[in-house]
Image (cartoon, rainbow, N blue to C red):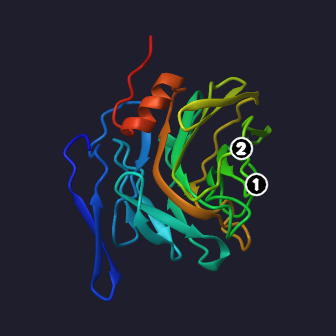
Amino acid sequence: MKGNATALSICLGAGLLIAFPLSAHLVEKTPSLVLHLPLDEATGVRLKDRSSFKNHGTINGKPTREAGKRGGAVRFHGSATNAFVDVRPSASLNLKGPHTLSFWLRWDGKGAPWSPLMTKRPVDVTNPDHYSTWVRSDGRFEYRNDNGTVFANRKVPLTNKWTFLAVTHDGKANVTFFIDGATAGKKKLRRTTPNTGPFVVGSGRHLAGDFGAGAIDEIAIFNRELTETEIKDLMDNGPGAPTRSR
């Protein structure tokens, strides 16, 4: 484990306690990192953003905590618990140009039609959709905005093992998918105009049947397009300070 890691313990009841190391990067200094939710909190509804923008999240509903890829993770259970994480509207998340979304997913494809959605749009509506990403229960990795939907060239293996997923937009019309650090397809999709909605994890519209399933860890958003080298570094080391390739 790199950095100044410590331990996080979660009580599972009946005196049973599990412990695992916290995410290594405790303070983020990367200027382009506008959101980093390690999801290491063992209790409570507040999820701390480790970027300098303080885009903290609030848990709604009843997801469960478990050991993550790094530190803790949050597992969503579809409409069984109607859980989601809400990050209040912030100018730092109104991405007008290039951007990168990344997260770890552990899911077997059951419990909902898709993994926990990550979306920037007003509550209770489908549009305007600034940026959204998720994995469907058939393994298709998706990125969506107001101008349409594109998919990765290969499917995500839904074997209930941790998989690192990232998607970039160059701020013009090019989307690139990454699965476990490797490029998984390049697609055309024009950028859209930012909206003033919140960033939400777990549900797109907070409506019945719209909630995702699966465990999520290390959610990160950058306001630039990371390179494949940087994506690999992000997967290996976490959202601390990916090295810009030259």
Which residue in the protein does label 2 denote?
Answer: 155
Q: Position of residue 192 (x, y in %)?
A: 71, 35
Q: Position of residue 18 (x, y in %)?
A: 30, 71
Which quarter of the image is occupied by the N terminus? top left
229 vs 201, left or right, is left
Is residue 150 shown above or below 39?
Answer: above
- Residue 35 position by quadrant: top left
Give the total of numbered labels. 2
240 vs 183, left or right, is left
Type of the residue with mark 2: Lys
Label 1, label 2: how far apart the Cα atoms are: 8 Å
Type of the residue with mark 1: Asp
State whether residue 71 appears in this view.
yes
The residue that appears at 47% across and 64% down in the rendered structure is: 74
Residue at the bottom extreme? 14
Mark closer to the chain start, 1 or 2: 1
Which residue in the protein does label 1 denote?
Answer: 138
In this orientation, which residue lies closer to the viewer: 60 or 26? 26
In this orientation, which residue lies closer to the viewer: 143 or 181? 181
The residue that appears at 51% across and 66% down in the rendered structure is: 75
Mark 1: which secondary structure? loop
Mark 1, other Cα within 10 Å: few <14 / some 14–19 / many ≥20:
some
90 vs 21, left or right, is right
